[in-house]
Image: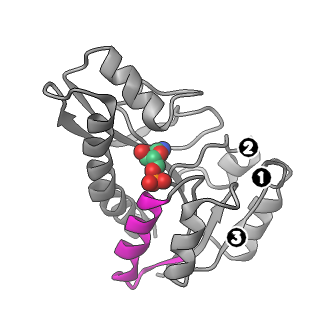
Amino acid sequence: MLKKVAILSSGSGSNAQALITHFASQDNIEVVFVGSNRASAGVLEKARHSEVHHGHFTKEDLNNGTVLGALEKLEVDWVLLAGFLLRIPIEFCRRYQGRILNIHPSLLPKYGGKGMYGIRTHEAVFQAGEKESGMTIHYVNEHYDDGAVVFQGRVKIDDVTNAQEIADRVLKLEHAYYPRISSELITLDK
Ligand code: GRF
């Protein structure tokens, strides 16, 4: 059965692009919407290039149910957050319970929660002198980085000299695993 997916992102959208590219080769999954809370986000440009329906919305649109309504109208089955920085409202989480995933660039529960995003996460990991980092794919609930963990990919970082090197290694894992793991889960959803 065809499953319709929406991707939400606030940033450059390299993970969103990896998802779009991967799903384009699968006939049971279709990306029907790419949305961002930042009008200038690179992800919208990437969606335009890939000819995927896309749009910008405000924080208020997300919190007052407008975004949820739009996704329901598009008959979206699964929501994938890929570098999306706003908290998902509780009604939204309930509507897509078990069908909304996020990716986080650390081995949760370490280095997660409010304010832990992007290079800030990797700075914290670097300052702590961790020997290993990685990425976490988890279900989303109404708290930041708190839902059940689906998958973690790990990478050694004992030889790095700065946080950016950690970021580069973790991003590679994200691009490799997020499309694969999300696609498996969506395909299992009957
Ligand atoms: C990724 O590290 C993702 O895990 C995090 O934000 C970054 C987004 O990168 N939540 P991109 O926009 O997918 O390039």
Left or right relative to 88: residue 15: left
Colouring scheme applied when the structure was drawn: one colour
Can the viewer see residue 128 in this picture? yes
Q: Position of residue 188 (x, y in %)?
A: 38, 65
Q: Nearer the viewer, residue 60 or 89?
A: 60
Which residue position holds label 3? 55
Residue in the picture at 54% in, 56% down: 99
Magenta residues (range): 13-31
92 left or right of 166 in image: right
Q: Which residue is mark 2?
A: 89
* Residue 85, x across and y down, in percent: 61, 43
Dots 2, 1 in contact, CB < 8 A: yes
Q: CA distance from mark 2 to mark 3?
A: 19 Å
**Picture residue at 57% right of the left edge, 56% below the top:** 9
Residue 74 position by quadrant: bottom right
SS for callout 3: strand
Q: Quadrant of residue 37?
A: bottom right
> Which structural element holds mark 1?
helix
**Sequence-wise, which precedes: disc 2 or disc 1?**
1
Q: Above or below — where is 112 with respect to 15?
A: above
Can you tell which of label 1 and label 3 is closer to the viewer?
3
89 or 116, nearer to the observer:
116
Residue highlighted by disc 1? 62
| Amino acid found under the numbered disc labelled 3 | Gly
Tag 2's secondary structure? loop
Q: Which label sits in the foreground, 2 or 1?
A: 1
